[in-house]
Image: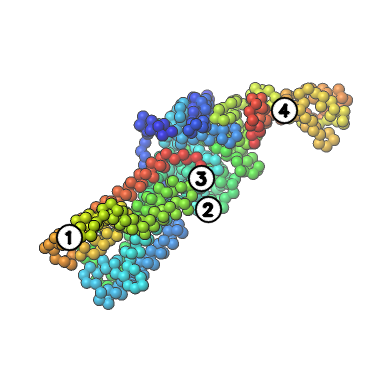
Amino acid sequence: MLAQREHVLIGQQREGSPWTGLWAVVAKEMADHLTSVRMLILEALIVLTASGTVYAATQSLRAGAGGSFLFLNLFTTAREPLPAFVGFLGLLVPLIGIALAFDAVNGEFNQRTISKILAQPIYRDALLFGKFLAGLGALALTLSAIWLLIIGLGLLQLGAPPDGEEVVRILWFLLVTIFYGGIWLALAMLFSIVFRQPATAALASIAVWLFFTAFWGIIASLLAQLLRPAPPGDTLALIEQVQLELALARISPNTLYAEVALATLNPAVRALGLILPIQLHGAVPGSPLPAAQSVLLTWPHATGLIAATILIFALGYVLFQRQEIRA
Amino acid sequence: MDEIVVECRELTRRYGDFVAVDSLDLTVRRGEIFGLLGPNGAGKTTTILMLLGLTEPTSGSVRVLGLDPTRQPLSIKARVGYLPDQVGFYDGLTARENLSYIAKLNGIRGREMQERIREALEQVGLSDVADRQVRTFSRGMRQRLGVAEVLLKRPQLIVMDEPTLALDPEAVREFLELIRRLKSDGITIMLSSHLLHQVQAVCDRVGLFHKGRMVLEGTVRDLAQRVPGGAYRIHLEAEGGPAVEDALRRLPDVIQVTCDGAQTYHIEARSDLRADVARSVIEAGGKVLALSADIPRLDEIYARYFQKKEVAYAGAA
């Protein structure tokens, strides 16, 4: 059967654009997302945490904690018992991503709408990509709204506008957060293609997320110790081990995202990972990095997040193209 | 009009070792209602999916409206309406919203879209419930909404997969009525069903499927003649009492005689025995009051055909 398909794909040219009908799909899916109860709950949840943590942060900041970069501190300042807003984001963004897509394709099968939709003059490409774009759009919309809410709260509570540096950092962080969500969106969509039951797809997505959040760090450290054993006193071997552990840990999107959050929201961070004292020669400790330098520092992370999103989406795309549509 | 709308030549589709459709030859002409009939798993749905380019043939050729479904799927799908088996809808949306999504996927927008939606809803008699959520619709209404979706694109050919399945008898009657109206508008219709007797009334021609092959093709009357042994049902109203009944039973080719009431007899026979029945009633001293025969039922033709072929499958509905 695969050979057949390849024959068709290579030997013949399809007529028309694969994006015919894309915007109709995006508009419909977007409308579905924005009016769905699921989205309402998520929005309520995220607005609640945002206003709660940021309000707590402004209280701390007014009390005199934190120095320069007040607006960045809004994201990162924690006050007992609440963690900082970035801490919540690491949890909420995957949740939104998964919630937006875990029934994207199998939902159409279960509603028995798939064959009817694909019998319209569109390609499967348009349906899948439209669903992904709509999810990403809904995610971007929600996150942008939250960001504006936070800045608004900051203006009201702190009484000072953010400066240019801060705006660049906040926007960069927003962009990276959207793509971090994109990974989970693409993953949930992939599982919605693989599994016929939406509940299974949701559970599988959450399992992957949990694996990377809770276990990947431990596994990376164990693997590093196993592959690059460092006898006591051998500093060089130890450095190699730590570097391997870091490289392994960065396979997890959570690690990448956490590092971006750290470097973007804390201008004092000049490097991610291991730094030797020699490398710090001549640096003024604690002096902030310009925003452009921080963006540069996290550029590989952002590229990694986007690449992972594209890879996962591509895998789902191939599987969807090969799927038999009869229910 | 004799234009060919659908043409399949030696169309074959395999799933691994399983042959779903086995070198199918099929021709459907403009304005016809063609029935793809046969039990579940006989290859009807696979054939339909190949016509629409939703599944690729393993070998053989398909032409729909002169186009090739694997090369020109968009042109075909813009001209051919497909009503799938138990069509689904977005339950949270209204009938109108469901229709407008389909219209937009077909590139129909704005006033043109509103106009076509109004027209389609009117044609299937759902204008009054256009703004109700589809989750409140009965099965019959959903089926008609499915037809409305198909009509939106003003198709030249409509393909329906098991359209009468799970409808109550009244809804089936209404639905078949709708199909006849569409035919009178000049639309070619192909429909598949395993409920042979339900659709035989509307089909101009039928093809009987069995294990991926189309074993019989033609008008229902044709088939009855080509498959000897298809049962004829003769209804007789006659005076004369038990003597008449005995005489009827003695006729050659009679399978069964049942009597309900004092004067009404139902005779099941292997051939059209109306003349012999009338004669034997008179010879037995009775009086013929009424005499009529049913067209042979397709499912019986089908069953007989396979009994003859010693195929285990018997009875389609």
- Label 2 vs label 3: CA separation? 17 Å
Residue denoted by label 2: B133
Circle 2 or circle 3, nearest the eye: 3
Q: Which of the two discs, 1 and 3, labels the residue nearer the N terminus?
A: 3
Q: Are marks 3 and 4 on the same chain?
A: no
Q: How far apart are the two marked residues, 3 and 4, measured between alpha carbons?
A: 40 Å
* Number of other residues with Cα within 10 Å of mark 3, as a class: few under 14, some 14 to 19, many 20 or more: many
Local packing at callout 2 (Cα closer than 10 Å; few below 14, some 14-19, many 20+) is: some
Image location (x, y in percent) of residue A136: 36, 53
Q: CA distance from mark 4 to mark 2?
A: 47 Å
Q: Name the residue that disc number 4 marks.
A: B232
Looking at the image, can residue A93 be seen?
A: no
Q: CA distance from mark 1 to mark 4?
A: 98 Å
Query: Label 1 vs label 3: CA separation?
Result: 60 Å
- Residue shown at 51%/51% (left/top)? B91
Image-based side of A160 in relation to A185, left or right: left
Residue type at tag 1 = Leu
